[in-house]
Amino acid sequence: MIKLGVIGYGYWGPNVVRNFNSVASAEVVSICDFQQSALNRAQQSYSNVNLTCDCREIIRSPEIDAVVIVTPVSTHFELAKMALENGKHIFVEKPFTSSVTQAEELIELAEKKNLKIMVDHTFLFTGAVKKIKELIDTKVIGDLYYFDSTRINLGLFQKDVNVIWDLAPHDLSIMDYLIGPAPVAIMATGMAHFDSDLENVAYITVYFSGNLIAHINVNWLSPVKIRTTLIGGRNKMIVWNDLVSDEKVRVYDRGVETNDTEKAYHQRMNYRSGDMWAPRVDQIEALKVEAEYFVDCITNDKTPFNDGYSGLNVVKMLSATEKSIKRGGELVYF
Amino acid sequence: MIKLGVIGYGYWGPNVVRNFNSVASAEVVSICDFQQSALNRAQQSYSNVNLTCDCREIIRSPEIDAVVIVTPVSTHFELAKMALENGKHIFVEKPFTSSVTQAEELIELAEKKNLKIMVDHTFLFTGAVKKIKELIDTKVIGDLYYFDSTRINLGLFQKDVNVIWDLAPHDLSIMDYLIGPAPVAIMATGMAHFDSDLENVAYITVYFSGNLIAHINVNWLSPVKIRTTLIGGRNKMIVWNDLVSDEKVRVYDRGVETNDTEKAYHQRMNYRSGDMWAPRVDQIEALKVEAEYFVDCITNDKTPFNDGYSGLNVVKMLSATEKSIKRGGELVYF
Amino acid sequence: MIKLGVIGYGYWGPNVVRNFNSVASAEVVSICDFQQSALNRAQQSYSNVNLTCDCREIIRSPEIDAVVIVTPVSTHFELAKMALENGKHIFVEKPFTSSVTQAEELIELAEKKNLKIMVDHTFLFTGAVKKIKELIDTKVIGDLYYFDSTRINLGLFQKDVNVIWDLAPHDLSIMDYLIGPAPVAIMATGMAHFDSDLENVAYITVYFSGNLIAHINVNWLSPVKIRTTLIGGRNKMIVWNDLVSDEKVRVYDRGVETNDTEKAYHQRMNYRSGDMWAPRVDQIEALKVEAEYFVDCITNDKTPFNDGYSGLNVVKMLSATEKSIKRGGELVYF
Amino acid sequence: MIKLGVIGYGYWGPNVVRNFNSVASAEVVSICDFQQSALNRAQQSYSNVNLTCDCREIIRSPEIDAVVIVTPVSTHFELAKMALENGKHIFVEKPFTSSVTQAEELIELAEKKNLKIMVDHTFLFTGAVKKIKELIDTKVIGDLYYFDSTRINLGLFQKDVNVIWDLAPHDLSIMDYLIGPAPVAIMATGMAHFDSDLENVAYITVYFSGNLIAHINVNWLSPVKIRTTLIGGRNKMIVWNDLVSDEKVRVYDRGVETNDTEKAYHQRMNYRSGDMWAPRVDQIEALKVEAEYFVDCITNDKTPFNDGYSGLNVVKMLSATEKSIKRGGELVYF
């Protein structure tokens, strides 16, 4: 039985606790939050769990195997470091840390102590992303041309991070998982409103080697909610709309073929417009699968694919967007 | 009766001829194309029109009042200049010219000769754009925060221009018309595929004074066709989907209100989520309205709002995207 | 504090218990189910509640004020009668009873004992139905022409009732609530498959006095889920799509106006095609509001609008469909 | 070269003329209409065609091989009969005739004179219907369970026929073509408004042998336009939405499997919910294909599949709906 302590019981914490509790070989034994109201809510749902407003009580508890950190990103590093130093495995909310050096230090520490880090890139455990990963890995899609994601809605404005740090970790972690090789350069533009200097509208372009380009559109000021990702490949193209209940992933037999016998460039282009196919996608609660996977990695000493390095990749890209946006959209190389 | 000569009878030319012929006080008397097959098509539909493969026959004809130029952009300047020199009003396909200096020279020439220039920014004559313009001008939308447009589909790859010069003139001319003040700076990123050096996927960010930002996503490699523009304002937000037959323009009573009595930034944010309203939009053929307007401007000596300066604004922005994309996405100031 | 006993903890029961427990002045003190597995699930969530497989334990408990019956329809009458005889208020799952005489007997019994009956027509407590009711009552829609509802999906085939008794109570109760006056006649057609004699596809037409007609399309064999109701009125028309998260209720300023000065019938028709408007609809959990309302009706001795008579109206219509379908779609008058 | 005379140049006539003129081996030589304004329109587009307001001029012309009848249904019989008597093949707008006996008389006459009848069931020539036909004929769909079609919009109210005779011929001809065997019985309900006795809202149920049921919902009073047909089969299910430009036909690998080892009916049901697949559908102008087919049938003495018998089938069903609706929705057997 893996015993867990959860730090942070705000918006996402209750989901995390519920799902870890649903894992047969795991148990949340302690929950910490600074807000008494959060602890009261926890009390109502979990009458047998230890509740505390002092996170050290969790981090130092000899009973606890792993610490789940579901707090604002600015606190991740300190809490994660303490937990690792006290011999706890850690499960950390995205984004992993506020800086690249923080992420690197935590990875080093975990390796030295032989502890697991899992970064909560929940989307990687959805049926949709798994299906897309399978389509790419089995060459159904073919060489990738572009990855274009839109993640926009009204609010919630964050107090300490801009819209990129809030929303783009989803797209960046999905992109990193699906594409594999690291990007070559990144750039970002955006705008802040309401007397804040935190961007609430932003656009990110990511260059990869070869002719692969990625783009992410994030916005806290959209009247409508959109969660759509287009992936263009040589053989097939994907449109993933995460907001529909059915047929989230659509695969189009569409594309361009070049005909070398014609001389003029535009005459060499033939457009292929064939069938569309929406493969069945597993309807699972991603966080539940992820929680089981974390417990499994600890129990069987496996390295999770969404480990510290995966978290680091995303933080590297986020940091680069920050540098780029401050320099007026300058291209930042890795 | 205004007599017109049309140069270019390819993809768009037949629409132009049909619509100018539908204007009561106008008549297309001559059509020119270099391709005999195009002239044959014209012959079938318009047996009484003069057909020629020599554009000078039109440009120098004493009978003709105005020349309609529906040819590739690289030929616009030369044809337009000749036409103006021969005392003809001109109606020029978008984009106006290949360069800023070309546009400026044509404007100067037309002013000297007291001739009209109209640039075919057809979308400005649609019911949807007219309705959005009205909503902005009457302050229903309020101060603008962002303009975000997506114009993507499969093909048609052009031989001489990239996807920006092909598709973005629509968005740039609409943006210029709706927003008014000129942008401060522009930048663009993109990617070419298929052994071409012409981008087929591109992203443009446009900065305006104040906190207004615009973004345009154009793509010739999308499996699905999207024509959607979001406009965020202080009072209301618009989603314009040009591909639906009904309710193209949706106005959302949604937004953010800041509450100055709260200290913390994110606590000052209140989200307003009210009704949606889809105003009735005129179902008209935009090109027909535009053709009537051109004839009216000539007959009654009016300056069209989509004149040479309007065309110049778009060419300025297109040229800036070219400079930016060549310099790796560098910000280009105007 | 109103103390409740819940009989039936299958598919819908857990929702009912959770929502009644969320009412400040109410408490579920006892849960009954014949299946031990159901009781085990209840035990996990509600460790302090009395659990039993003998419903008489609940019905006879002096501690309990009201009995909530969430069992198959064939058992409603017996359980409800026992509960009323033992002086308990009752909250009964839809449809109220299996027959008209059963419903009438329960109503009479409740009146004699001065007890409340509430039939769980949950949809009447949704933001969408409340908004539509308001639009009809305030004459925004005008005289009604038709009510046309489609409720189709794949499964779940019921063992004891056909698709009409399973799905149509939603539409019939909504129709009854929105329209008011009782129907004049009803007829139904349908088909059974899979060696069953219970229809899994069915169509119901309901005639009202005046020129109002209603139609309900229910189907357990549809590959796609549809929940759409159209309501046509003299002034406005409504399309309610319950499956979209936003803009569920759309009000169209569309219709027909007759022009008496023209002689020919079809020439007298003018079509009005104006704005569409999607009023903000409350995002509430309907069952929670309904639970509060039941407790309020008991506490303050109010008659619920979804009382036994409301349940009876629906059972009358269901019984008429049964008679009609057995007689080959014959019109059944009330 | 097949020479055609067209009677009727109202709403649909111009489409018919344009498409017959596009057939290489055919030519419209004469157009008739009672309205001078219609003839003026024809004059503008076809300066070389003979124009007349006397249909006998066409029917008796020795030059003409076939007469195309695009007039109100009440005139079809008389015009068609005259044309056949004068040795002309006929192409008749849907519905074929006003009564069964009329249709039968025309069929007999045509057979005696060895002339072709084609009834303009245009939808049978669309890419969508062809694809669905192919899916049914190749057993991809499997045994059919139901056919459920919705064809609703605002207007146009007809002066001489109700909404069934106006809109349902489309659905009935498609159903007849796809399903094959004739129906066993039919019934219809509906309602008239606006002081007319012609129904503007109507519902038709059609019973076939076996367990196949069809339903058609037609409405001139809907605020939104819907053209959707669901077809449920043992192996696959189809949703055909004719209003989308892409992916009109969607094939769902969904259905129900019965498991005979279980005793209880509802326990024997297993729901299959697999992939969705949208086959590429030809983007063709159906009327053009149909025009070519008519000319081909005449030239090569073939019997069209949409011949008089096909038209008769639809008229039989329309007549049965009329009988049913007049008798209060009584089931009418064939």
Image (tube, coloured by chain):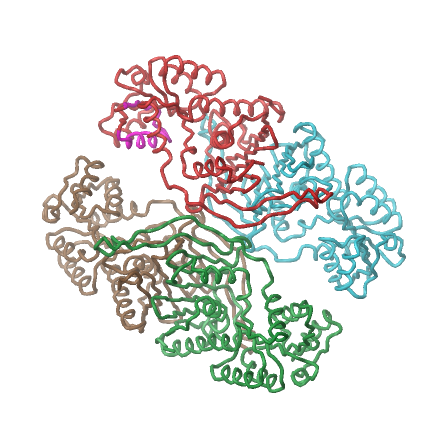
Chain colours: A cyan, B red, C green, D brown
Q: Nearer the viewer, residue D131 or B297?
A: B297
Tell me if I can see residue A177 in this picture. no
Please say if B299 is above or below A59.
above
User: Does B4 appear in magenta?
Assistant: yes
Residue pictured at 32% horizontal, 26% vertical: B295
On screen, residue D252 above or below C47: above
Asked if residue C115 is among those painted magenta in the image, a careful observer would answer: no
Q: Which residues are magenta?
A: B2-24
Q: C34 or C120, which is in the foreground?
A: C120
Q: Is residue A202 left or right of residue D174?
A: right
Which percent across, then down, holds residue A318?
A: 71, 37
Q: Nearer the viewer, residue B228 or C143?
A: C143
User: Percent x, y for residue C301?
Assistant: 60, 76
Occupied quadrant, residue B76 = top left
Q: Quadrant of residue C147?
A: bottom left
Place of residue B57 in the rendered image (x, y in percent of width and height, measured from the top left): 29, 16
Measuring from the top left, give residue C70's x and y in whole percent.
60, 75
- Tell me: D240 left or right of B235: left
Identified at 39% across, 12% down, the residue is: B112
* Quadrant containing the N terminus of chain B in the rendered view: top left
Question: How many marks overall?
Answer: 0
Where does the C terminus of chain B fall, quadrant-wise?
top right
Give the residue drawn at x 50%, y 18%: B100
Q: Is residue A103 visible?
A: yes
Question: A331 left or right of C182?
Answer: right
